[in-house]
Image (cartoon, helix red, strand yellow):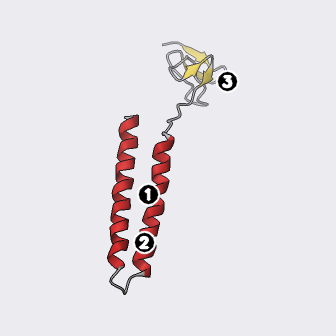
Amino acid sequence: MALMKCPECQAQISSKAESCPHCGNPLRATPDMVGGRQVKTIEKTAKRYKGLTVLFTLVLLLGIILAIALYDSSGMGIGFVIVGLALIGLSITKISAWWHHG
């Protein structure tokens, strides 16, 4: 194991190091490097999943509002049914997005 100077901070580091332990400067091209520049992987979630998440969140809020507004009347159950359906829809949407991006 030979020592070398980091080109960024000039610290003595191992020649086998992939990055400088002092400043984090990458010393070798890694799979995350292209042309000497670091590449960030961005997970794209389909607009369909985002739209469904927004829709079911709004339905959930509507169900909560109905359950509170109709608390003393016999129609309170419809609010809870809407809340339950919204939670099921949100769960299915999240599982589908996870499955799609596996």
Q: Earlier in the sequence, mark 1 or mark 3?
A: 3
What amino acid is at disc 2?
Ile
Q: Which residue is mark 1?
A: 56
What amino acid is at disc 1?
Phe
Residue found 37% across the figure and 34% down from its top:
102
Residue found 46% across the figure and 68% down from its top:
62
Q: Which residue is mark 3?
A: 8
Q: Residues within 10 Å of mark 3 (few under 14, many from 20)?
A: few
How far apart, in angstroms, are the residues tagged by discs 1 and 2? 12 Å
Q: Position of residue 15 (x, y in %)?
A: 53, 15
Residues under numbered marks 2 and 3 in contact, where contact means CB atoms less than 8 Å apart: no
Q: Earlier in the sequence, mark 1 or mark 2?
A: 1
Give the secondary structure at mark 1. Answer: helix
Give the secondary structure at mark 3. Answer: loop
Q: Residues within 10 Å of mark 2 (few under 14, many from 20)?
A: some
Q: Position of residue 79 (x, y in %)?
A: 37, 72
What amino acid is at disc 3?
Glu
Q: Position of residue 51 (x, y in %)?
A: 50, 49
Residue found 37% across the figure and 55% down from its top:
89
Give the secondary structure at mark 2. Answer: helix
Depth check: 93 or 70 in front?
70
How far apart, in angstroms, are the residues tagged by discs 1 and 3? 50 Å
Depth check: 2 or 8 in front?
8
Residue found 35% across the figure and 38% down from its top:
99
How far apart, in angstroms, are the residues tagged by discs 2 and 3? 56 Å
**Disc 2 vs disc 3: which is toward the camera?**
2
Depth check: 50 or 42 in front?
50
